[in-house]
Image: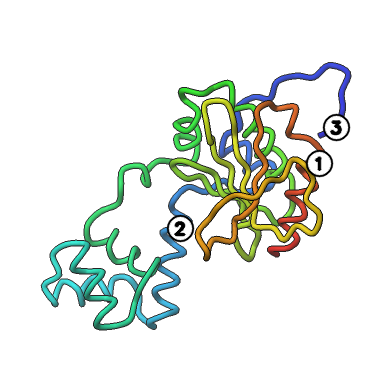
Amino acid sequence: MPDSAEPRPLEPITSEGLASGGAKAGSWQHMVDSNKELLRRKTGHDTDYWVQRASEAGVSNDRELRDWMREDFGITGYAQYAVSWEMFGYPDFMLKDADQLIDGQYEHHPHLRPITDEILAWASTTAGVHIQMRKGFISLHSPRRKFAQVTRATNQAVDVTLRLEAQAMNGRIERVKTRADDPFTLRVRLTSPEQVDDELFTVLSLALAQNS
């Protein structure tokens, strides 16, 4: 971020502010739409079609639906969610907008909110970055895929986990233990807004470039 003679605190970032800066702050609706599109690409049929088929088959709960879709049609993963949510309802937190989601994340840890707001300010002014709000974290996506995640990790720290092939790791980037199929193997832990600096933005920009 540019130096200034009189540093001033950032105002809390809102979805309206992010949109005006060029990046769209999305809530769960983006995932809902993506899952529906995935189902259509995989099967050639939309969500309404599968809801009708499942109803005709007598499916009455989520477990039955997932077994039926997997065993009878080979449909697994996120594509199943499109049908499950439509039939059995959406979790309450998925109906909240982006502002409600981020406010909820930092309601009891307001001292950490400026760290995340600094990162969102960078994301909102960086071409090609799409911001997605979740209940417990914030995802940063390139047009191709997710490249970083911002999470309040402890009572005193925010973690930025990265999908990054780092050729030379500096002291701020740590390896984290993950599942074998999880590509987010690196993180930067932040405990103050001052640590959200040009070095961190360079790392985020590299992750963005590698995943675009």
- Reading the image, the residue beneath label 2 is 31
| Residue 26 pos. (x, y %) | 52, 48
Of callouts 1 and 2, the N-terminal one: 2
Measuring 31% from the left and 43% from the top, which residue is drawn there?
A: 92
Determine whether, in the image, residue 125 is placed left or right of residue 187. Answer: right
Q: Is residue 203 left or right of residue 48?
A: right
Q: Quadrant of the C terminus?
A: bottom right
- Dot 1, crowdedness within 10 Å: few (<14), some or many (≥20)? few
- Mark 3 highlights which residue? 2
Residue positioned most to the left = 58
Q: Where residue 166 appears, x then y in whole percent?
A: 75, 57
Numbered disc 1: secondary structure: helix
Q: Which tag, 3 or 1, sits closer to the chain's start?
A: 3
Q: Quadrant of the N terminus?
A: top right
The amino acid beneath tag 3 is: Pro
Q: Quadrant of residue 47?
A: bottom left
- Residue toward you, 104 or 167: 167
At 37% from the left and 82% from the top, the residue drawn is 43
User: Distance between the Cα atoms at labels 1 and 2?
Assistant: 31 Å
